[in-house]
Amino acid sequence: NAGVMQNPRHLVRRRGQEARLRCSPMKGHSHVYWYRQLPEEGLKFMVYLQKENIIDESGMPKERFSAEFPKEGPSILRIQQVVRGDSAAYFCASSPTSGSKNEQFFGPGTRLTVL
Amino acid sequence: TQLLEQSPQFLSIQEGENLTVYCNSSSVFSSLQWYRQEPGEGPVLLVTVVTGGEVKKLKRLTFQFGDARKDSSLHITAAQPGDTGLYLCAGALGSNYKLTFGKGTLLTVNP
């Protein structure tokens, strides 16, 4: 029973390049969430998706960031024209429902370093 | 302003000691989760509490949700080096699926 999978685990990009982060939710989970963890800060919500739908992207910067969760395949968080301030750990979580108990299970994260 | 305040921020103790860490807020949460995160890894869910006054036990760990659902505590009995890690609390407001995280308590248990 595999947990949430993320790849790559580490990603190095130069300023101006694109970063693509992938997340495969736990089996049976149709709700995916992306969070960002900056040094010295807690995890911050970015976006919530269900299959083929973005439900809430209120925590995601309006420029350069986008997310998708296609019918087939993993969820993708895409950062265009990366800047040094994008360096952080990006975590994906999944849940079977979005109910009040709202238990979210996290993947190991992708550590993005922008040079 | 941090919605969820965790204290202490750092805690270093000897193996065998007991400890309590706290998670406080002025907001009411519909549910609250505790996670443990190790360096280079993602948060691992330990427990979810949903009812005011609820107490849950997980081996040597005891979790309590405040009566007003604004605060929570985690008590560890006879701490072991394997308990070392960053303990995070996270709450959901109303039916909101967004988890709000505290900054965590970094626990070090020395052998």
Image (cartoon, helix red, strand yellow):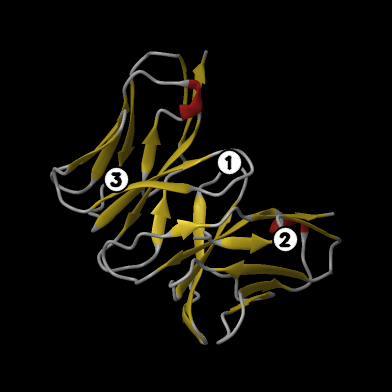
Q: Chain of mark 2?
A: A
Q: Residue furthest front?
A: A1
Tag 3 residue: B25
The numbered dot on residue A40 is 1
Give the image location of residue B98, x and y in percent.
39, 64
Cα distance, mark 1 to mark 2? Answer: 23 Å
Q: Which residue is painted at 52% across and 15% down in the image?
A: B110
Q: Are marks 3 and 2 in contact (CB under 8 Å)?
A: no
Give the image location of residue B11, x and y in percent.
46, 22
Q: Which residue is painted at 54% across and 61% down in the image?
A: A4
Q: Which residue is painted at 65% across and 69% down in the image?
A: A22
Q: Quadrant of residue A7?
A: bottom right
Frontmost residue, A78 versus A2: A2
Above or below: residue A64 compared with residue B68: below
Q: Earlier in the sequence, mark 1 or mark 2?
A: 2
Frontmost residue, B61 versus A60: B61
Q: For the residue labelled by badge 3, is the local secondary structure a helix, a strand or a loop?
A: loop
- Which residue type does callout 3 highlight? Ser
Dot 2 surroundings within 10 Å: few (below 14), some, or many (20 or more)?
some
- Which residue type does callout 1 highlight? Glu
User: With A65 as the anchor, is B3 left or right in this view?
Assistant: left
Q: Chain of mark 1?
A: A
Frontmost residue, B107 versus A7: A7
- Which residue type does callout 2 highlight? Pro
Tag 2 residue: A8
Q: Which residue is painted at 70% across and 55% down in the image?
A: A9
User: With B73 as the anchor, is A113 left or right in this view?
Assistant: right
